[in-house]
Amino acid sequence: MAKNKTTETEVDVIDFIKSYVDNDQKKTDSYQLIELLSEWSGFEPRMWGPTIIGFGSYHYKYASGHEGDAPLLGFSPRKAQFSLYVYSQTEKSKRLLDDFGKFKMGKACIYVKKLSDINIAVLKELCSETIAYLNEHHECACRS
């Protein structure tokens, strides 16, 4: 079985942002996301892999037998845009996207250029819905 590449690391989140993010607006947005996702999840930020900032964790196991851990919520301040890992495939989440703002949907994340492009209140609801979904379907740090 292949080892997961995206695991929690000991890299300091603030050091990562200072060294990786070269755009002042993206740095400001990154610090705001850290504040918001910490508050909404109840967890401090931790680095997952080389570029994902995650909050809390859950354990997943697929029918194939593949299993691992992933952050409850997370984001990555990639060069072109933010990757937000805050979405679960629920009917409520799908409806919330109607009022989310300017974004593109990926397979496992939502892409946004800057926080001013999105509705922060809807982001909060998406995060709450995702935490509830993960709590119901996986072994989740949100239960402790």
Image (cartoon, rainbow, N blue to C red):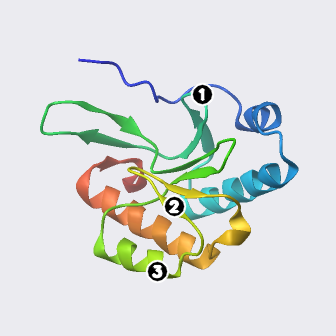
Residue 80 vs residue 69: left or right? right
Please tell me how crowded label 1 is: few (under 14), some (14-19), or many (20+) other residues with Cα within 10 Å. Answer: some
Residue 98's tag is 3
Q: In the structure shown, which secondary structural element does the residue marked by tag 1 occupy?
A: loop
Q: In the structure shown, which secondary structural element does the residue marked by tag 2 occupy?
A: strand
Q: Residue drawn 44% across and 44% down?
A: 57
Q: In the structure shown, which secondary structural element does the residue marked by tag 3 occupy?
A: helix
The residue carrying mark 1 is 50
Of pointers 2 and 1, the one earlier in the residue sequence? 1
Please tell me how crowded label 3 is: few (under 14), some (14-19), or many (20+) other residues with Cα within 10 Å. Answer: few
Total labels: the figure holds 3
Comparing labels 2 and 3, the label whose residue is closer to the camera: 2
- The three-letter amino acid code for the residue at tag 1 is Pro
Residue 58 coordinates in the image, percent (x, y): 37, 44
Image vertical order of residue 73 relative to residue 8, above or below: below
As drawn, the residue found furthest toward the left would be 63
Q: Which of 133 and 97 is in front in this view?
A: 97
Residue 115 coordinates in the image, percent (x, y): 70, 65
Q: Residue drawn 56% across and 65% down?
A: 103
* Residue 15, picture quadrant: top right
Comparing labels 2 and 1, the label whose residue is closer to the camera: 2
Q: Are marks 1 and 3 in contact (CB under 8 Å)?
A: no
* Distance from the alpha carbon under mark 2 to that under mark 1: 23 Å
Q: Are marks 2 and 1 in contact (CB under 8 Å)?
A: no
Comparing labels 1 and 3, the label whose residue is closer to the camera: 3
Please tell me how crowded label 2 is: few (under 14), some (14-19), or many (20+) other residues with Cα within 10 Å. Answer: few
Residue 117 vs residue 63: left or right? right
The residue carrying mark 2 is 104
Of pointers 2 and 3, the one earlier in the residue sequence? 3
